[in-house]
Image (tube, rainbow, N blue to C red):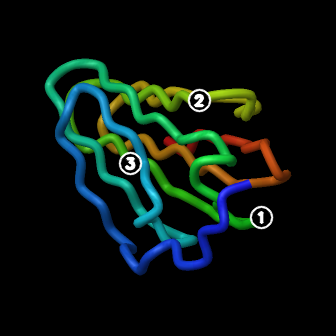
Amino acid sequence: MAAITNLGSNRLISLTGASNTLSNNVAPFTVVAVSHGSATTLTIPESTDVEYGLGTVIFVVQTGAGAVTVAKTGSDTIATTVATAAAGDTLILTKTSATGWTSALAT
């Protein structure tokens, strides 16, 4: 696994692209606000590239008209809901194992 010890201190990240990838600048308990006029994809890098600690929570908030789909790379998994449906929806992503995330939708 990648030996990343400092995942940064960003607590609020605003994204506007049609496709975005999280990086190692995401701190635990970060809010990622995604605003785009059409559907967007937010990718979580594989655990071997960015080592998010167990219990890391990332709140993905749809602030624009486009739904946000969360995807992963490599062999990592995301259990349950992976997309928002309307502005104001929030996906709560929690790192639950070395390569696994659980997602819950709050509307």
As drawn, the label of residue 54 is: 1
Q: Position of residue 88 (x, y in %)?
A: 34, 44
As drawn, the label of residue 99 is: none
Q: Which residue occupies 51% across, 72% down?
A: 7
Q: Which quarter of the rendered picture does the N terminus lie within?
A: bottom right
Mark 3 vs mark 1: which is more N-terminal?
A: 1
Distance between the alpha carbons at the discs numbered 1 and 2: 18 Å
Distance between the alpha carbons at the discs numbered 3 and 1: 21 Å
Question: For numbered disc 3, what is the local secondary structure?
Answer: strand
User: Residue tagged by mark 3?
Assistant: 61
Mark 3 vs mark 2: which is more N-terminal?
A: 3
Q: Residues within 10 Å of mark 3 (few under 14, many from 20)?
A: many
Residue 79 lies left or right of residue 27; in this view the side is: right
Q: Three-letter amino acid code at disc 3?
A: Val
Comparing marks 3 and 2, which lies closer to the viewer? 2
Against 12, residue 19 (above or below) is above
Q: Three-letter amino acid code at disc 1?
A: Leu
As drawn, the label of residue 73 is: 2
